[in-house]
Image (cartoon, rainbow, N blue to C red):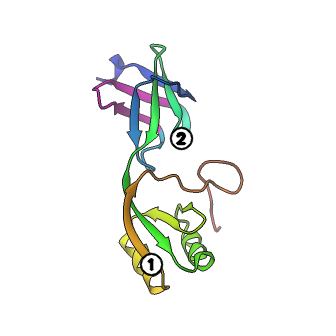
């Protein structure tokens, strides 16, 4: 029953020693959800609005404690090749993309991988935390984008 669980209505900075929960990129976008740490500490996230919770932040619990967020490892694809051209095609599909000096990283997606290979990209399957570039009009995810 979620009524007896501690709740988190606020996001704060994590501090050393906070218990940690690892969430992948999709899981870090939330408003209301029951979560549980690896040690079995369950709590209810109940934020006033959808938030993009970043690694290094923490859920402030109604009990006064905090649960720190870290990026969970997930299936990713490292992309090398003509990066400006490849980045344009990735962005044209509104796909979150992590940008490094000599490569790009996206979440594993067989459809996008086939498209990128067709454009001459060299792809390598990797596993790790995913922290894509934020939106142009502020940090975090670009939400509410429309072509209407």
Q: Where residue 65 appears, x then y in whole percent?
A: 46, 17
The residue labelled by disc 1 is 122
Q: Where residue 127 appears, x then y in whole percent?
A: 37, 57
Q: Where residue 59 appears, x then y in whole percent?
A: 49, 28
The disc, 2 or 1, on the residue closer to the chain's N-terminal end is: 2
At mark 2, the secondary structure is loop
Query: In this rendering, would 109 be left or right of 141?
Result: left
The dot on residue 54 is 2
Position of residue 62 relative to residue 53, above or below, is above
Q: Where residue 101 appears, x then y in whole percent?
A: 61, 65
- The image quarter containing residue 4 is top left
Q: Which residue is drawn at 35% across and 20% down?
A: 5
Residue lying farthest to the right in this orientation:
137
Exactly how many numbered labels are in the figure? 2
At mark 1, the secondary structure is strand
Range shown magenta? 31-46
Q: Which residue is drawn at 48% across and 85% down?
A: 120
Q: Is residue 143 something that shows in the picture?
A: no
């Amino acid at each position: 029953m979620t009524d007896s669980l501690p709740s988190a209505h606020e996001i704060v900075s994590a501090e050393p020693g906070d218990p940690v929960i690892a969430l992948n990129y999709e899981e870090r976008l939330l408003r209301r959800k029951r979560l549980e740490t690896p040690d079995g500490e369950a709590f209810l996230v109940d934020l006033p609005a959808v938030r993009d919770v970043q690694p290094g932040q923490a859920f402030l619990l109604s009990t006064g404690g905090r649960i720190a967020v870290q990026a969970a490892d997930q299936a990713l694809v490292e992309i090398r090749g003509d990066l400006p051209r490849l980045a344009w095609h990735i962005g044209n599909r509104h796909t979150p993309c992590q940008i490094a000096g000599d490569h790009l990283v996206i979440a594993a997606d067989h459809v996008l991988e086939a498209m990128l290979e067709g454009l001459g990209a060299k792809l390598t399957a990797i596993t790790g935390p995913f922290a894509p570039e934020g939106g142009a009009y502020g940090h975090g995810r670009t939400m509410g984008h429309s072509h209407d």
